[in-house]
Amino acid sequence: MDNEIFESILKITEKQDSDEFSLSIVATLAEIIPDSVVALFEYCQFTTPPYQCITSLSIEQQDSDKLRYLWDIKLPASSHQYIRDHYQALTHLTEYQTNDDRYHVFIPIDIEGKVVFGLEISSLRSFREKLEVLVAITKVCQNFYAILSYSERDSLTGLYNRRTYDNKLNSLLKNQQSSQLHHYHPELEQETRLLLPNSTTWLAIFDIDFFKKINDKFGHAYGDEVLLTLSQFMQQSFRNNDLLFRYGGEEFVLILEPVPFEQAVQVLNNFKTAVAQYKFPMVGHITISCGFAKISKKDHPKTVFDCADKALYYAKEHGRNSVYNYELLLEQGQIQHGIEEGDIELF
């Protein structure tokens, strides 16, 4: 194996966290191609275009022979335009040159035959002689990434699992807020919420009403189909920058990127209504209950989850198919700190 490829792969695969691993791939490719812009895209089939930029990097050579890493820089307009216009063809390695005299290569990264990421490299100088190295590195890395992904994703729905929630919530929140602040582009406004005054991050818990009855009546295979369909519905309904988890059983967690309270209420109620109106195969109509609470820097994740969970219990006790906020219930005297909710039939 070429020594450059071997050393690059060795450096990248030292990372045991998928986020760090992704950044390591971007940094390694940027080091191999001087004066380039390297961007990592995530593929989401429910957005148009489906490729959404996660991060980008350009490396400058300084006079002292030190490298300066410029993260989250604005991509060349030609990169955005080409990916927007040709995303359907970007399922295999693609080389192209744009009118601004930039050379580009797009390398999709797939797991089990499904494209999950894409790497775009652009430069004012041709780097065709390095193409074999780039492809070799990404092909090996995609196999390693698959191993990391399996440990972080729920096998049925493909959403983040509870282990990821417990281990990576703080880092995911930092990445989420950074993405909202630095990755805003007017052409992607439908996929980006502006950070408005009085915005805060929200944790919401969704629970399928009477899910046990669905399993008992139709069988677990149809119950799994409901879970899978609901998870896909969530991916269609929420923004790419919102974080989705299957927390366990029929319980899902959403981390809504910073928005004002009124917008959070509207978003969550719109989703609840859309679910109630949707006809699930064989099962028919179902409903969900939701409780949510705000996340601030001083809050412990476990505390916030417990607060949202109390609001969810309140929704279950008061008719289901509803959305309640913990802070508002507390202010209204409907619930109290440290008071456990009564025994109720959750399913």
Image: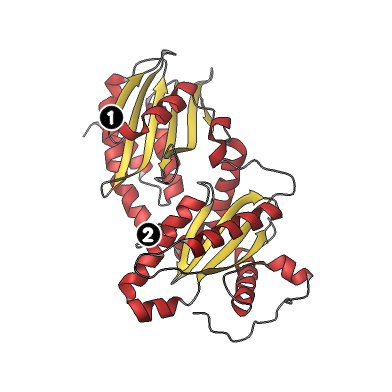
Q: Which of the two residues, 60 or 185, is positioned nearer the viewer here?
A: 185
> In the rendered image of this protein, does residue 19 appear above or below residue 3?
below
Disc nearer the start of the sequence (2/1): 1
CA separation, marks 2 and 1? 28 Å
* Mark 2 closeness class: few <14, some 14–19, many ≥20 residues within 10 Å: some
Identity of the amino acid at label 2? Ser
Q: Is residue 136 left or right of residue 200?
A: left
Looking at the rendered image, the disc whose residue lies closer to the viewer, 2 or 1, is 2
Q: Is residue 166 visible?
A: no
The numbered disc on residue 125 is none
Residue drawn at x 50%, y 22% is 60
Q: Tag 2, which secondary structure?
A: helix
Q: On the image, which quarter does residue 205 sit in?
A: bottom right
Q: Is residue 244 left or right of residue 327?
A: left
Residue drawn at x 36%, y 80% is 217
- Residue 114 in the image, given as x and y percentages of width and height: 30, 46
Q: Which of the two residues, 346 or 69, is positioned nearer the viewer here?
A: 346
Mark 2 in CB contact with mark 1 (< 8 angstroms):
no
Q: Tag 1, which secondary structure?
A: helix
Q: On the image, which quarter does residue 280 sit in?
A: bottom left
Which residue carries the number 2 mark? 151
> In the rendered image of this protein, does residue 134 appear above or below residue 21?
above
Q: Is residue 260 left or right of residue 151?
A: right
The numbered disc on residue 133 is 1
> In the rendered image of this protein, does residue 234 appear above or below residue 222?
above
Residue drawn at x 58%, y 31% is 186
Furthest residue to the bottom? 343
Colouring mode (rainbow / by chain / secondary structure / one colour): secondary structure
Q: Which of the two residues, 295 or 90, is positioned nearer the viewer here?
A: 90
Identity of the amino acid at label 1? Val
Residue drawn at x 62%, y 73% is 315
* Mark 1 closeness class: few <14, some 14–19, many ≥20 residues within 10 Å: some
